[in-house]
Image (cartoon, rainbow, N blue to C red):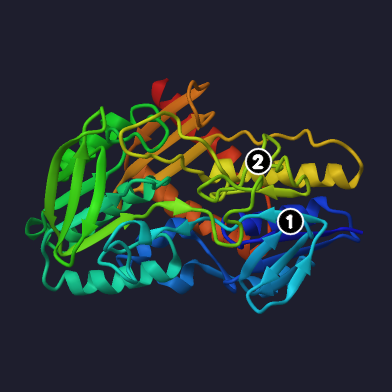
Amino acid sequence: MAHIVIIGAGLGGVPMALEMRQKARRGDTVTVISDQPYFNFTPSNPWVAVDWRKPEKIRVNLAPVFKRKRIEFIHEAAARIEPDQNKVTLASGASVDYDYLIIATGPELAFDEIEGLGPEKGFTQSVCTADHSVTARDKWMEFVKDPGPVVVGAVQGASCFGPAYEFAFILDTDLRRRKIRDKVPMTFVTSEPYIGHLGLDGVGDTKGLLESEMRDRHVKFITNARVKQVLADKMIVEEVAEGGAVKQTHELPCKYSMMLPPFRGVKAVQGIEGLVNPRGFVLVDKTQQNKKFTNIFSVGVCVAIPPVGTYPVPVGVPKTGFMIESMVRATAHNIRALLDGKPTTHEATWNAVCIADFGDGGVAFVAMPQIPPRNVNWAADGKWVHLAKAAFESYFIGKMKRGVSEPFYERMTLDLLGITKMKEE
């Protein structure tokens, strides 16, 4: 019988474990390794950062869920993958042997690549992790007592832009509810070549929809931005021209800032030739399988995907829930095929679905496939998006508590497109 090991217990790792348990043979062992004892619903982190959600409300303790589903759980960090020996070395020095390995770690947050970036050694906040969101909330509660300029956005090398837009507009909504919006100048800073690019060259009219939101909410913005340095009271930002020259240098005063950092692969896989690219992201083919180490698969944000184009400032490609879901399903089917002595034939669709909440409305989009040209290229906005995000949060957390794996994003996509069709009719 086989031992199937999954590293990571986030939006990719937990569904992967549940799906793999269903597809594996009864005698196979499925083990999850994670440095966190709980699953955190990352899309709700921006709400935690403004105290609209309590951290414990978006968490699920994993041990009891995995026990019910016959999934082994090791609550410890993976220090190093040793693919030539088919084992994972843990932080304690112990090791775990595997027959098949699925890397679902998410990224390492590269705050150190920009001076002054990050909540631990710098001056910016983050909503990328549960702990960072709690810190951002504490800083925000201090800020609203004595408000001033705010800067929000995503730095060069970031590959997830939706949360930056969400957080900027959620802050705007929160400030207006507190009746202090007039005391807070806001600037959105992004490495994207234009507002609404999202690392995808736009979806539908995200450019028009998000620019309109910026104007309506009095949020200034700088695109093609390269953050040079963050100080305690200001951010130094270079606006880069198309040819790569610095068009203008901005010194933005800021009393509160949240900047999504660059991403890179986690230390456990960095530098392993044939497994990862120079940034440490895992190399996989369309079946989610690594070509050199064919018993290793990967899903989620840690997967290497080339950018959609060449830009003056580096812009990464996001991995949304629909894409991760399709990676998970393809991986589970393909490992079962290998267990049965069959070839890997299932391919992830890599479509994109996103619900971006703005606190009092939002934007939803569907890109099929994620990289253009597309068969479906749709975006819409409205107050219904906020309600949809809240409903999705409740559903997904409930699904994790029950230990259920099912293709929800596919159904949600059809529902979203159905809403558009009804509006058109």
Crowd tier of the residue under label 1, counting other residues whose Cα lies within 10 Å: few below 14, some 14–19, many 20 or above? some
Do residues under tags 2 and 1 come within 8 Å of each other at their CB atoms? no
Q: Residue at x 42, y 28 (%)?
A: 309
Q: Is residue 88 above or below residue 265?
A: below
Q: What is the number of the mark on residue 83?
A: 1
Q: Amino acid at mark 2?
A: Val
Residue 186 position, x and y percent, is 15, 52
Secondary structure type for disc 1: loop
Q: Does residue 407 show up?
A: no
Q: What is the number of the mark on residue 261?
A: none
Q: Amino acid at mark 1?
A: Pro
Residue with the most extreme bottom position:
92
Q: Which residue is mark 2?
A: 284
Q: Residue at x 59, y 45 (%)?
A: 324
Residue 216 position, x and y percent, is 16, 40
**Quadrant containing the N terminus in the rendered view:** bottom right
Specify whether 355 is left or right of 94.
Answer: left
**Quadrant containing the C terminus in the rendered view:** top left
